[in-house]
Amino acid sequence: MEFLDPALDDYVAKSTTAEPDALHKLNRETHLKVLQPRMLSGHIQGRVLSMLSHMIRPERILEIGTYTGYSAICLAEGLREGGRLDTIDINEELQPMVEKYLALTENTERIRMHIGPALEVIDTLEVPFDIVFIDADKINYINYYEAVFEKLRPGGYIIADNVLWSGKVIDESEIAEDPDTAALVEYNRFARADERTENVLFPVRDGLMISRKKPL
Ligand code: SAH
Ligand code: CA
């Protein structure tokens, strides 16, 4: 489901800075060779993630759900001098493609890919994060939020993708029958009710929930 009228969506794309060349190629190769290419963030959301990262100027970013590396490369664009992004994916088959495209960007040295189940890898990462981008299995979104919370600096951000789930989050029969829809509804409710954060659900593409950890 597209939330915006296609002509308006087109206008939004035209009025937004174009995809950098390496990302354009990565987008195309993902569509040609990888299963479920719709999972890739794409032009507009990629530029949104890059813009948010430039606004925050993070030193450390954690991404949960690398896929072919598109969103990692976008988020890394706003890293501060000396900063670094850690990204986790359970699917090791993706690694060669991620590495190929990282080599085409300026941020090769600043991005580290970890292979494994995210909850296990998160346990091995110390150091406070400024941004955590949650974009892996929807069932575990609340677990990811809880697992990273103490590793997020006060004033840091948790950004969760696909929280509108093509609009299914307001469809009672989907909520009853589809575990991913139910998990995302639960996530949105949980984040909204958490007194430790301020939350805004941005209706960008498939929905981005941005939670800001209140300063102590
Ligand atoms: N962030 C990417 C898209 C991520 S797609 C982008 O915007 O371009 C979701 C990814 O989560 C898939 O690559 C999948 O392999 C990964 N994933 C699913 N379950 C996982 C788990 N338990 N631990 C780590 N990664 C997982
Ligand atoms: Ca996503």
Image (tube, helix red, strand yellow):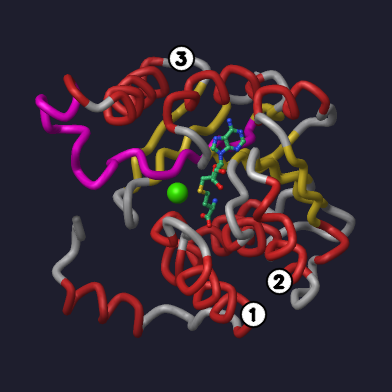
Which quadrant is the C terminus positioned in? Answer: top right
**Residue at left 63%, top 57%?**
75
Position of 198 with respect to 74 (left or right) is: left
Q: Do the residues labelled 3 and 1 touch (CB within 8 Å)?
A: no
Position of 194 with respect to 147 (left or right) is: left
Q: Name the residue under label 3.
A: 195
Separation of residues labelled 1 and 2 (CA atoms) = 7 Å
Position of 190 relative to 101 (above/below): above
| Amino acid bearing label 2 | Tyr
Task: Please give the range of residues in magenta.
Answer: 155-175
Separation of residues labelled 2 and 3 (CA atoms) = 40 Å
Q: Which mark is residue 101?
A: 2
Q: Are marks 2 and 3 in contact (CB under 8 Å)?
A: no
Q: Residue 22 carries which label?
A: 1
Position of 41 with respect to 111 (left or right) is: left
Secondary structure category for the residue under label 1: helix
Secondary structure category for the residue under label 2: helix
Secondary structure category for the residue under label 3: loop
Separation of residues labelled 3 and 1 (CA atoms) = 40 Å
Q: In which quarter of the image is residue 148?
A: top right
Instruction: Compare residues 45 and 130 and report the one nearer the observer.
Output: 45
Beta carbon at label 1 within 8 Å of ligand 1: no
Residue 208, x across and y down, in percent: 40, 45
Mark in front: 3 vs 1: 1
Residue 168 in the magenta stretch? The answer is yes
Position of 131 relative to 118 (above/below): below
Q: Are marks 1 and 2 in contact (CB under 8 Å)?
A: yes
